[in-house]
Image (cartoon, rainbow, N blue to C red):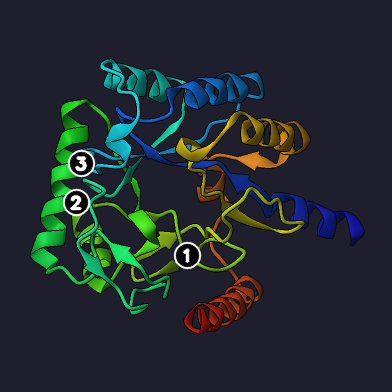
């Protein structure tokens, strides 16, 4: 009985390393350091790549003219290439009416279904030109509406690296992998993803991240591991429901 419970907890405890805002213009100094660290522990992160980066803030970072060759090398290592929005340009305010009640600005929320579908398909075309297949997505600033989810489903993307809960779940014909914290936190039970903006790091924060990886590398999982966990159950769904309701209320009060 104890061994079975221990195995259940171990199987359902893990962290997916999700890197945000990966594009030609970024902090390549810290990306290079992360790559060496991931290779050391055979970690296969998920990279949120902006297919057509037009964000003026991000464009201030150093540009790598061999960016797509670098992406190809990551793909050959088994790293997951994910689509992080399209241009990373914010067009609307959500007034906390987005799917997850994050609030703030959005690249997708409030736009027509046709407009959102165009963005997603245009992003997929860019990846296709580079012979990269995409199966997952997450929007800048966590902001989606139902048109976003419908456009993803129509485009054949059915994995969203975002959401509430301690466990992955199916909803709106999509598979969500929760992302809860702004810092790297390893929970004692549950599956989630990080939210890492290495463009904002300094050397001190990289050292913090390196220590975190050294301590927790054996609990870091990749996307395929999560997809092979199987369907959710009543216990997981109940926990997820409670976490979602609590966090949404807290976010509305901010």
Closer to the chain start, of discs 3 and 2, is 3
Q: Could you say whether the residue bearing mark 2 is in a helix, strand or loop?
A: helix
**Circle 2 sits on which residue?**
120
Residue at image x 35%, y 68%? Answer: 104
Q: Dot 3 surroundings within 10 Å: few (below 14), some, or many (20 or more)?
A: some
In the depicted view, which residue is nearer to us: 212 or 95?
95
Closer to the chain start, of discs 2 and 1, is 2
Residue at image x 59%, y 58%? Answer: 181
Give the left or right position of residue 225, taking residue 60 as reference.
right
Q: CA distance from mark 2 to mark 1?
A: 19 Å
- Asked if residue 139 shows in the view, the reply is no
Q: Position of residue 60 (x, y in %)?
A: 30, 33
Residue at image x 30%, y 64%? Answer: 105
Location of residue 76 by image quarter: top left
Please, is residue 217 above or below residue 249 in the view? above
Residue at image x 63%, y 36%? Answer: 205
Can you tell which mark lies on residue 163? 1
Q: Could you say whether the residue bearing mark 3 is in a helix, strand or loop?
A: loop
Q: Could you say whether the residue bearing mark 1 is in a helix, strand or loop?
A: loop
Are the two marked residues, 3 and 2, in contact with CB atoms closer than 8 angstroms? Answer: no
Give the left or right position of residue 183, taking residue 78 as reference.
right
Q: CA distance from mark 3 to mark 2?
A: 15 Å
Please, is residue 6 above or below residue 67 in the view? below
Q: CA distance from mark 3 to mark 1?
A: 26 Å
**Circle 3 sits on which residue?**
54
């Amino acid at each position: 009985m104890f061994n079975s419970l221990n195995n259940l907890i171990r199987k359902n405890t893990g962290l997916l390393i999700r890197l945000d805002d990966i594009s030609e213009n970024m902090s390549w100094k810290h990306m290079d350091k992360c790559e060496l660290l991931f290779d050391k522990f055979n970690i296969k992160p998920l990279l949120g790549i902006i297919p057509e980066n037009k964000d003026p803030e991000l464009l201030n970072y150093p540009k790598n003219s061999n960016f797509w060759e670098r992406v190809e090398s990551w793909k050959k290592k088994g790293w997951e290439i994910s689509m992080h929005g399209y241009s990373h340009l914010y067009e609307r305010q959500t007034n906390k009416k987005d799917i997850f009640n994050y609030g703030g600005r959005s690249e997708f929320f409030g736009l027509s279904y046709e407009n959102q579908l165009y963005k997603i398909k245009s992003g997929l075309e860019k990846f296709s030109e580079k012979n990269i297949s995409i199966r997952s997505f997450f929007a800048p600033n966590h902001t989606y509406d139902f048109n976003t989810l419908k456009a993803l489903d129509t485009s054949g993307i059915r994995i969203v690296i975002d959401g509430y809960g301690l466990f992955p779940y199916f909803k709106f014909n999509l598979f969500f992998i929760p992302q809860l914290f702004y810092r790297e936190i390893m929970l004692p039970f549950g599956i989630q993803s990080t939210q890492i903006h290495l463009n904002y790091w300094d050397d001190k924060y990289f050292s913090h991240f390196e220590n975190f990886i050294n301590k927790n590398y054996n609990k870091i999982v990749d996307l395929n591991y999560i997809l092979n966990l199987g369907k959710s159950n009543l216990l997981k769904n109940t926990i997820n429901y409670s976490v979602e309701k609590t966090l949404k209320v807290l976010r509305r009060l901010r």
